[in-house]
């Protein structure tokens, strides 16, 4: 479980039969920028059951100010437009959610 207070939960729906191409473009062009500006991701997933052709990634932040600062750095990065241009024809839709951590006693280890 992430120890970050805020998580950016992104879902991209990729064109039919284009997931491999999208993953290659994302890895080659987006990841260097994202790791430099957003830090280490929580993880990446592709859909298996339910809505198909979806790529999900999660990034953790300390708070909303941290999210805004790092997102602005990503958007202003000189290499980011190359990823946007190379992936535009591959992405059908994008959902972005900011979700907050919940402190549930049931999730804490018992002493």
Image (tube, rainbow, N blue to C red):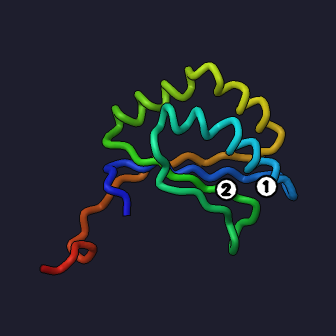
Is 91 positioned to the left or the right of 61 in the image? right
Q: Give the camera-side residue of 37 and 104.
A: 37
Image quarter in which the N terminus is found: bottom left
Residue receiving disc 1: 19
- Give residue 66's position: percent from left, percent from top: 36, 34
Label 1 secondary element? helix
Residue at the limit of the structure toward the left, as seen here: 111
Is 94 positioned to the left or the right of 67 in the image? right
- The answer for how far apart the CA atoms under marks 2 and 1 are is 8 Å
What residue is drawn where x is 75% and y is 42%?
Answer: 25
- Give residue 60's position: percent from left, percent from top: 41, 48
- Give residue 9's position: percent from left, percent from top: 51, 51
Q: Which mark is residue 34?
A: none
Based on the displayed image, in which of its 4 quarters is residue 19 positioned?
bottom right
Is 58 positioned to the left or the right of 20 in the image? left
In the image, is residue 87 above or below residue 24? above
Residue at the limit of the structure toward the right, as seen here: 17
What residue is drawn where x is 31% and y is 55%?
Answer: 3
Using a 10 Å C-alpha cutoff, classify the residue at mark 1 as few (fewer than 14 neighbours), some (14 to 19) or many (20 or more): some
In the image, is residue 72 above or below residue 30? above
Image quarter in which the C terminus is found: bottom left
- Give residue 70's position: percent from left, percent from top: 44, 31
In the image, is residue 61 above or below residue 106? above
Residue receiving disc 2: 55
What residue is drawn where x is 45% and y is 40%?
Answer: 39
Based on the displayed image, in which of its 4 quarters is residue 16 positioned?
bottom right
What residue is drawn where x is 55% and y is 37%?
Answer: 34
N-terminal of the two: label 2 or label 1? 1
Label 2 secondary element? strand
Q: Do the residues labelled 2 and 1 touch (CB within 8 Å)?
A: yes
Counting labels gives 2
């Amino acid at each position: 479980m992430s120890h970050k207070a805020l998580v950016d939960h992104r879902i991209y729906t990729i064109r039919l039969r284009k997931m491999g191409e999208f993953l290659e473009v994302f890895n080659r062009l987006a990841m260097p920028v994202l790791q430099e500006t957003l830090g280490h991701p929580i993880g990446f997933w592709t859909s298996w059951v339910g809505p198909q052709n979806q790529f999900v990634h999660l990034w953790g932040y300390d708070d909303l100010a941290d999210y805004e600062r790092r997102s602005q750095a990503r958007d202003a990065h000189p290499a980011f437009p190359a990823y946007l241009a190379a992936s535009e024809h591959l992405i059908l839709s994008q959902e972005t959610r900011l979700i907050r951590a919940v402190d549930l006693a049931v999730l804490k280890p018992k002493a």
